[in-house]
Image (cartoon, grey):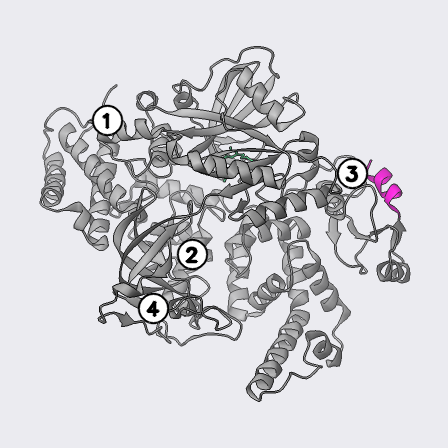
Amino acid sequence: MSKPGRGGSDSGDAGAQDRGTDVQAVLAALDATDTAALAEAEAGDYIAQLSEILTRADLAYHRDDAPVISDADYDRAKRRLAELEAAFPALARPDSPTGQVGAAPSEAFGKVTHAQRMMSLGNAFSDEEVTDFVGRVRSFLGLGAEAELDFTAEPKIDGLSLSLRYENGVLVQAATRGDGTVGENVTANARTISDIPQELSGDVPEILEVRGEVYMSHADFAALNAGDGARVFANPRNAAAGSLRQLDAEVTRSRPLRFFAYSWGEVSAPLAETQIGAVKRLASIGFQTNPLTRLCHNAKDMIAHWALIEAQRASLGYDIDGVVYKVNNLGYQARLGFRATTPRWALAHKFPAETAWTRLNGIDIQVGRTGALSPVARLDPVTVGGVTVSNATLHNEDYIAGVNSNGEKIRDTDIRVGDWVKVYRAGDVIPKISDVDEAKRSGAEQPFAFPETCPECGSAAIREPGDAVRRCTGGLICPAQAIEKLKHFVSRGAFDIEGLGAKQVEAFYHDDTLPIRSPADIFTLKARDDANIPKLKNRDGWGETSASNLFEAIGARRHIPLARLIYALGIRHVGEVVAADLARYYGNWASFAAEVDAAIPAAERHMEADEAVLHERAAAASEGRRARVSATRDAVLARAPALPGEAVAAYESLINIDGIGAVVAQSLCATFAQAREREMIETLVALLDPQDAEQPDTEGSAVAGKTIVFTGTLEKMTRAEAKARAEALGAKVAGSVSSKTDILVAGPGAGSKARKAADLGVEVIDEDAWLSLIG
Ligand code: IVH
């Protein structure tokens, strides 16, 4: 293997020596320092310096063929950086030159659009949630308690997922998950993994995408970290990810990666009729499948198998973080289908979090994009489940005080600076503090006074009734909120602009020559740079290529999928799933915006009613009496003057969208009603060319684009399944009948909805007619 060395033991030219001195100075300083004792800020500085040195060295070597530092220095710098990243994982950058977290420069690998999306899994943390899951599946499928419903249960491997495409039994492509839709092409690297067959044995479908997990065993991980390699990885998962995403496939070959197959994507012919059958088939054609995969007949069996796997967890020799349950019957899986990002037919039952005790050194307040003031615990670094933790969330002021939002005690004492606290981590979730050791108190611990002004902009920070968090009222004048909004805007599920990550956004925000202070500024960046005298390409850290790549990447994102655009706006309660639902329902930006605007008066009326109710209840409580009977939202609404029918209809169709309720609707309307926010959104959208929502393949569908309401009892399928089928055929399913309803499907027992449909002249059909309509 050729080392990505910098050209011999010493490099000759003067420029090289300058930078060589940089690296030596940094390395000398680090040699004189105990890495573990570094403060986080210092570690951050070192990480930044080393990353820059290594990135420059890589560019000089690979792009310019003009090495600037010696092999030995390069290796030492890389090793130092890896050590720092292992000690301070939170500081490791996704684009780190060690390649151990996230991707190597992503343009290095070609992009692959998955023929079928790679999904994630819903999580459960308790037995009860498993029972609920089984109940949900039964009810979706309309199965009675006696009907047979089996599940497979298998370990959830803590590695990274990989999709392998075989055509006529020959491996033609391997791709990482990426964002689920588009991944990275790592075919050359995957070919070096011995668990991955190049050719399949026996009779296999012409097209077969096999999915599974790449992982590294504990023993191999320990040997890799102890070896003479220039890298120290924080845990086997990072080691596996870093090893797979190597530009040089020979590096991957030298790493002991393994692969378990557990699922599939596109297949030209079904593998089997059951999940367990398909897994057996995968094993028979040459894949490793997990030996702890079992068939379970009910929730009790599943939980028992979970306990059995958990008991073996420490001795398995590789990391797992839970058990995955999957509906065994593949026909049922097809009927159950998917929510936005997860299948309805599978569930990950996680193991309890790992915990450790450490000292709380301080509490900092961070201001998020919605203005929420979040307390962050600064801790003495401690290892929890193989990862060093030095920060943890403390949720909100109630949590620190030791009460829940109803004022009930959740703990015997408050959390004080100087306390011994118990930290836990569950999977990828941010570390949290679950307990305080009161017995260890010396008396010097300081109770925490939660600030009532924003630490970033000084505006009042207030807590609305019913809100668990205190929020800065500074809006976009608060730099922290503006920056967080921008970071969200460019994040992965949102605009995801290559070359414009959180770090760059923050730098541009503070830049006076070429500032980005609102999302629209991103799309005027090039025009402004063209008009400027000092050009971006001439700045430190930038060049002709990087600047033009950035402008190109921004330009390409003007044509943005509607769901991403809605999500990117960073509206409270509008996450990726809700944004996808809204996009699917409204189809294009113009109807979405028009409908939200139209719904504003009704949403405001509802919010006022809710406030009046809260008020009355609070007044009653403080006077020691019961709240008036009229203190309900409906009663207040009934007393208010009538609203235009259009507003009511728009609001109702909004809250009737599956998965969207009053909370989302009110948050959307409140945002659109604020003149400044609305103007910002308009300015942004005027610079974009939003794509209409992808409609499901509705060729031959008689119901595409129609609004359907189901009522009464359905006998051939459950309501949930009927809805999912209708949506898959491009129909919109609403919860109540309005002038917008096209068809009411009424089963026995249909009541007021059928009458309303008749009044409005809406077509009413029975279940059989519905089934023949959808074929
Ligand atoms: S099934 C459509 N089975 O967990 C369902 N996933 O949290 C596809 N994972 O992205 C996933 N072990 O990377 C499945 N036995 C297993 C798994 C497993 C690990 C990973 C996979 C997935 C993630 C979701």
Q: Is 488 on the left-hand or right-hand side of 337?
A: left
Distance between the alpha carbons at the discs numbered 1 and 2: 36 Å
Q: How busy is the neighbourhood of tag 4: few (under 14 within 10 Å), some, or many (20 plus)? A: some
Q: Is 308 on the left-hand or right-hand side of 375?
A: right
Residue 29: image location, x then y, percent: 10, 45
Q: Residue 701 shows which numbered tag?
A: 3
Q: Main secondary structure of the magenta part?
A: helix
Mark 3: secondary structure: loop
Q: Earlier in the sequence, mark 1 or mark 2?
A: 1
Q: Is 497 on the left-hand or right-hand side of 114?
A: left
Range shown magenta: 766-775
Mark 2 C-beta to ligand 1 under 8 Å: no
Amino acid type at image mark 3:
Ser
Distance between the alpha carbons at the discs numbered 3 and 1: 56 Å
Q: Earlier in the sequence, mark 4 or mark 1?
A: 1
Residue 401: image location, x then y, percent: 39, 70
